[in-house]
Image (tube, coloured by chain):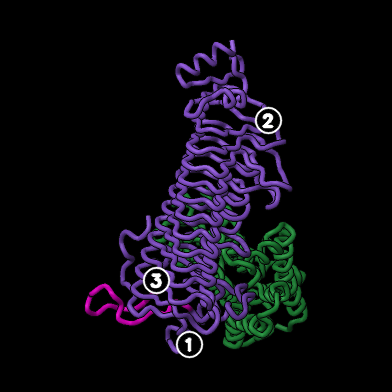
Amino acid sequence: MIIGALVFAIQTGLLIVSPQGPIRTVSAAVAAARPGDTIRVRTGTYREPTITIDRPLTIIGDSGAVLDGQGRHAILIVHADHVTVRGLDFIDTGMAYTEDRAALRVADARDCRVEHNRFERTFFAIYLAAATDCVIADNVITGRPGREAATGNGIHMWSSRNILVAGNRISGHRDGIYLEFTRHADVRGNVSEGNVRYGMHFMYSDSSNYAGNTFRANGSGVAVMYTRVVRMTGNVFTSNHGAVSYGLLFKEIQDPYLDGNLFSGNTVGLLADGADRLIAVHNRFEDNGWALRLFGSTVDGRFEANTFRRNSFDVAVNGNGTSTVFNGNWWDGYHGWDLNHDGIGDVPYRPMRLFAMLIEQAPPALLLQRSLFVKVLDAAERVLPVLTPTLVIDEHPLMRAPVGAAR
Amino acid sequence: MTEVLCLLRPAWREALRGRWLIGLAIALAGAGEMLIRFGGGGATTIVSLLDVVLIVTPLAALVVGTMQVHNAREITELFLAQPIARRRLFIGLYLGTALPLAAALTIGLLAPFAWHGLLFSPLAASLLRLGAATAALTMIGSAVAFVVALKADDRVRALGFALGGWLIGAVLWDGVILLLALLFGDRPVEIPLLVALAFNPIDLARVLLLLGTDAAALFGYTGAVVQHTMGTAAGHALLITALALWLALPLWFAARTFDHKDF
């Protein structure tokens, strides 16, 4: 029977794995396949030792084709170029404190596609090490949130090039999407929520693009560190609450570009600690505790045509000021006028209130939030503008919120 | 008890006759209606109403309470000539003043939500807090007003003291807290400051209300500390106990003054 199946495979390039068929394990199919063959995995649960793919293959799972790690081991290792893995369910790798155990690992490979798979209760779900020209798309990754050390990352990329990560849903992992030493990644249309640490975390990953992703209610938010040239457009950073949470953290970043993103309902919308030449246009900051916090190490930034609405504090700058320029943004706290009707307010706006500055010096004063005393302070500032700190100023505040800002 | 109820009735009538209460309730309902209409009736409406509650309620309770004691002076003297225990007369007077006021303010606050059908929306929990805070602040404000009015016989002086008390509670005390925070700002003094807040019922109510919105979650470390210490059941119990003390102590003091007062 096995010989019959192999003859069929040789004729058609298609091998079929099924619980009752002649080929009952994926490993056996891989061993029998020639480069370029397709392996079709029928519905059923397959419990076998870690499968290593060492030749160009396409593996397609029928709905309900489950590869079970039995809580003990990694499931699939791709160690060849031109491999496609589609439609499989990966479950239960178990935890591992001594290795980065991954349900699906791609190592030293080019041109791989990982699409439409499901990952449940895996330590790391998808792990790319030194992969090039890969597509990771439309996977659903559901971890079991626990302590930080008890769970790995959803999609982990290390030292990889030209990776497209699109349309995945990741939750319950340590970091939803993680990139380290990865260049030219394109991360778009993913939803990363409820992860223990970061929705997305990347370090030393230059020249990458992040568009249309949603990062919601992750432990800390999204952290971008030690990276040059980051482009983020149309993303949503939302509902990151906590003592040290933020929508987006820039730490030691050069030339980040933010366009059309929405920051809403975060403790801090955007936290910049050492971001050089940050450019932010057409973003919306709404319902955050602080829309922006800029540390003194953030230099030469530019904020234009952004919308600031219903934030408790729009901008907080620590230290003696900032070289970041605000120009032509819309602030809901602006009470100026526009005599020549050019849409630009005639008096500058200083978005950093006195109370915000006092809180920078004495954070516990936040206990007075919404106290009448603070309103009296605000009123005093309006009557005596000299009280308002001049650390941050928008010389040309808009009279109307820019249309088409963010989605 | 029946005596107390009998005493409640004239006080209640007196309160209604003054039309103070109806005016207050309508004003509050009007503010709520505007906020729902222009604010969409969401969480932002609640937050805006929170300001109204924290400012208006204690002020109204202090002013109305003080006036009421002086207005009821003649009837008090009349009752004192009857064989009624002074303590009972006091309880009747206090409840007759505080309960209608608390009812008027709470109803005025919640009525717009009721007729917009928002009472049992996701806002219900916040509204409950808001209503409870309004009632508590009214009862406390009235108790303080009784102390002031019984201590100061002159109507204008009493009103002056009441307004001064409101100013301290609503504004000045928080100024002191801010000063303390600035003095010790580099240290984690959240807990000592929370204790300092407890000396002001308006601050207590504010913390209680803020815990009901997601605002507390938005304030980083301080918000987390407040949520962690006061957001728990024990924390709530502590806040409510502190508020209860704020009701009991002035009431006891006012009752003692009333017992020995020579009208």
Q: Position of residue A95 (x, y in %)?
A: 71, 42
Q: Is B220 covered by the magenta stretch? A: no
In this rendering, the answer to whether A16 lies above or below A360 is above
**Residue A303 got which mark?**
3
Rounded to the nearest angstrom, the CA distance separating label 2 from label 1 is: 70 Å
Q: Name the residue under label 1.
A: A387
Residue bounds of the magenta highlight: A332-352
In this rendering, the answer to whether B173 lies above or below A272 is below
Quadrant (top left/top right/bottom left/bottom right) for the N terminus of chain B: bottom right
Q: Name the residue under label 2.
A: A49
Mark 2 is surrounded, within 10 Å at the Cα level, by few (under 14), some (14 to 19) or many (20 or more) other residues, namely some
Which amino acid does the dot numbered 2 rest on? Pro
- The chain whose colour is purple is A
Q: Is A338 covered by the magenta stretch? A: yes
Q: Quadrant of residue A18?
A: top right
Mark 2 near mark 3, Cβ–Cβ under 8 Å? no
SS at circle 2:
loop
Mark 3 or 1: in front is 3
Which amino acid does the dot numbered 3 rest on? Phe
Same chain for marks 2 and 3? yes
Drawn colour of chain B? green
